[in-house]
Amino acid sequence: MSKFSDLTRLPDARGHFGPYGGRFVSETLSFALEDLEKTYMSLRNDPDFQAEFDRDLAHYVGRPSPLYHAERWSRQLGGAQIWLKREDLNHTGAHKVNNTIGQALLAKRSGKPRVIAETGAGQHGVATATVAARLGLKCEVYMGAEDIKRQKLNVYRMRLLGANVISVESGTRTLKDAMNEALRDWVTNVDDTFYIIGTVAGPHPYPLLVRDFNAVVGREAREQSLKQIGRLPDTLIACVGGGSNALGLFYPFVEDEDVHMIGVEAGGDGIETGRHAAPLSANAPQGVLHGNRTYLMSDEGGQVSSTHSISAGLDYPGVGPEHALWKDVGRVEYVAANDKEVLEAFRELTHVEGIMPALEPAHALAHAKVLAPTMRPDQHIIVNLSGRGDKDILTVAKIDGMDF
C-alpha cells in the first residue's frame, strides 16, 4: 500500500482536504452548494451518467488525446525523452472542455436554463460557451478587462458562440476579480443559474468534481504510457494556476511513489520581485479566497496581493486546496518558471516540433527544458500540453514589436 493512499480519498464531510478547502460562503450559496453536492454524489458513480459523459468526450471532444513523443526536442535538449499529452488537440483547444462537458450535464440534470462562468485566458469561457450552445443554455462569462485586452481572439469566439462576455473593471481586472463577480451573480440568480467553475478551487464540491471530470487526462496518460513506453513515466510536469490541468494529470498517478510529479507556477518577473503568481513556490501564507482555504498571496494585513504573469490563465493569487495539501505532504514538487523562460519554451517547441503551445503549458515546458538534460536518455517525462497557442499569438506578437 502506498504511503500516499490517503490522498485518493474523498474530502471530509465539510469539503476539506486536510486543513484546506471547505465552504466559506453565504447562506444562500451554502444551500445551492449542498444541492449540487447531493446531485453530483448521486451521479458520480452512476453508470448512465458516466456513459453519457464518456460518449461526449469521445464523439464531441475527440478523446482520447494522443501521447506524443517529442523526439526532435528530446534529442536537442539531451537527456530524458519528453512526451506531450496533447490536450491542445481537444475540441476548443484545451483541457477545459473535459470539465465543462461534465458540469453542463449536471446543469441539464438540475434543470437550470442559464450558466455562468469566469475565465482568464478565455479557454474556459470558450469551452463553457461551446457546451451552452450545444445544449441551448443561456450563457454569460465574466472576464477581467485586462484579460479581455490580451485575449481578444477568445472573446470574439465566445461571442460568436452566443455568450455574453461581461468585462470586469474592479480590482486588478484579471481572473480573481472575474471569479468574484461570477459568485455575486450566482448569489443573485441561484434559482435558475448553474455556475460552471473552471478550476479546482472554489467552495466544496467544486474542487472535487472539477478534478474528477478532468482526471480522464491522467487515466489516458497512464494507459498510453504503459503501451507506448512500456512502463510508467519517471516524471509528470504540468502548469499550476488554480490547478485543474495538473490535478487531472497527476491524480491517477498519486499512489505511484516512483513517479515524480512537478507543478510549475507562474514566476512572472521572478519570485524575488513579488511580481508573480506562485503562492506555493513562494510559501505564501494561508487564507480564504472564493470560498476555500488555501495558500494565498496576501500582504501582512491579510489583503489579497496583486499578481503578474504573461499568461492570463495562471494570473491568480491562490491555488486549489488539493494542491496545497500535496505540497505539505511532499507528494508534488512545486516550482516556478518566469516569463522569459516561458517565452523561450514557447518559441522552441514551435520551431522544433511544429507545435505551438499556449503560454500556460509553456511554463511546464520551460521546466522540462531545464530538467531533461539532468536525466538519462532511458528516462521519460510526460508534460501536460494543456492548450494550444492560437489565443496567445497577439500577446507574443506585441512582445515582438508587431501590432495587428
Image: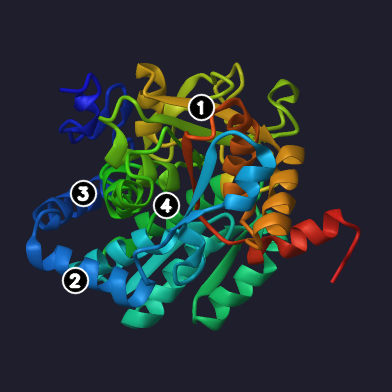
Residue 31 - label = 3
Residue at point 56%, 24% (across, down)? 281
- Which mark sits nearer the N-terminus, 2 or 4? 2
User: Residue 25's image quarter?
Assistant: top left
Q: Amino acid at mark 4?
A: Leu
- Which mark sits nearer the N-terminus, 4 or 1? 4
Q: Neighbour class for label 2 at 10 Å: few (<14), some, many (≥20)?
A: some
Q: Which residue is mark 4?
A: 183
- Secondary element under disc 3, as helix, strand or loop, is helix
The quarter of the image holding the N terminus is top left
- Which mark sits nearer the N-terminus, 4 or 3? 3
> Mark 2 or mark 4, which is nearer to you?
2
Q: Neighbour class for label 4 at 10 Å: few (<14), some, many (≥20)?
A: many
Q: Neighbour class for label 3 at 10 Å: few (<14), some, many (≥20)?
A: few
Left or right of residue 223: residue 236: right
Q: What is the spatial separation of the Cα atoms under label 2 and label 4, in whole angstroms?
A: 28 Å
Q: Amino acid at mark 1?
A: Tyr
> Mark 1 or mark 3, which is nearer to you?
1
Q: Which residue is mark 2?
A: 52
Q: Amino acid at mark 2?
A: Glu
Q: x, y (%) of residue 121?
A: 59, 57
Residue 334 - label = 1
Q: Amino acid at mark 3?
A: Phe
Q: What is the spatial separation of the Cα atoms under label 2 and label 3, in whole angstroms?
A: 27 Å
Q: x, y (%) of residue 40?
A: 17, 54
Q: x, y (%) of residue 231?
A: 32, 40
- Which mark sits nearer the N-terminus, 2 or 3? 3
